[in-house]
Image (spheres, rainbow, N blue to C red):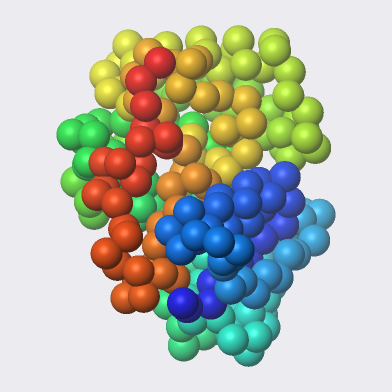
Amino acid sequence: MQTIGLLGGMSWESTLPYYRTINETVRDALGGLHSARIVLNSVDFHDIERLQHEGDWVQAGDVLAEAARSVEAGGADFLVLCTNTMHQVAPAIVRAVTIPLLHIADPTASAIADAGLSRIGLLGTRYTMEQSFYCDRLATHGITAIVPDDDDDRECVHRVIYDELCRGEVREASRARYRSIIERLVARGAAGIVLGCTEIAMLIGADDVCVPVFDTALLHAKAAAWRALDGESRRLTPAAPERHRHAATRA
């Protein structure tokens, strides 16, 4: 089994399900008391969020590059960055280490393709929705992503993430607002919804949406577990549609 290197803490609320999902997947594959081999560097999100707000992506990349080097030194065979937004600095991380990075958009795109879809709605932080790095990565897989076209809607999605979900708060009023935003994306042709921030699954699930929902944190964590198991337990790896069935389901 390979050792997974996790770069977490952005926020720690969403790093928790990464750790749980990876270990549950390994346990279910190998049985008994098996668990995953993991090296975790959990950064102080206060520092990262400040750099995001200031638009200092170079310094943010330097911070995560250093964290990645420490994870590699700890014996990790590959990296998993437990956040969507900070994949903005993925190139800086990749340059800093010799081990590969499992990009969060890749297993997400695979699940979308497995569902037979090519046009989805993307929710995330303002940075993920308004910058091109995430949509461009999905596009390399033939996936077209649309985001809320109303600035107030994008601001709402962003604010709820930082002011509520990253603090562990789940509010019904915010769930209702997200549902309305999703309905408008579906009306514009979104055949599925990507939860493009690892905290959004705290608020929105398959029961809230009339189209398939793709939980990026869950898909990323499962892909990391199966990559770590690859070779040792390839025969146990389920087919792609089964692997993603809990992350891409219809209400």
Residue 218 position, x and y percent, is 50, 45
> Does 128 sit above or below residue 209?
below
| Nearer to the camera, 9 or 227 | 227
Left or right, residue 183 beside residue 137: right
User: For the C terminus, which image quadrant?
Assistant: top left
Indicate the quadrant where residue 54 lies.
bottom right
Residue at the farthest front position: 32
> Does 63 sit above or below residue 25?
below
Residue 229 position, x and y percent, is 41, 69
From this viewpoint, is residue 242 visible? Answer: yes
How many numbered discs?
0
Indicate the quadrant where residue 101 lies.
bottom left
| Residue located 69% across and 50% down the image | 16
Residue 215 position, x and y percent, is 47, 38
Left or right, residue 160 beside residue 18: right
| Residue located 42% across and 36% down the image | 247
> Does 251 sit above or below residue 18?
above
| Nearer to the camera, 236 or 40 | 236
Residue 139 position, x and y percent, is 26, 48
Left or right, residue 169 beside residue 122: right
Left or right, residue 49 beside residue 220: right
| Nearer to the camera, 189 or 1 | 1
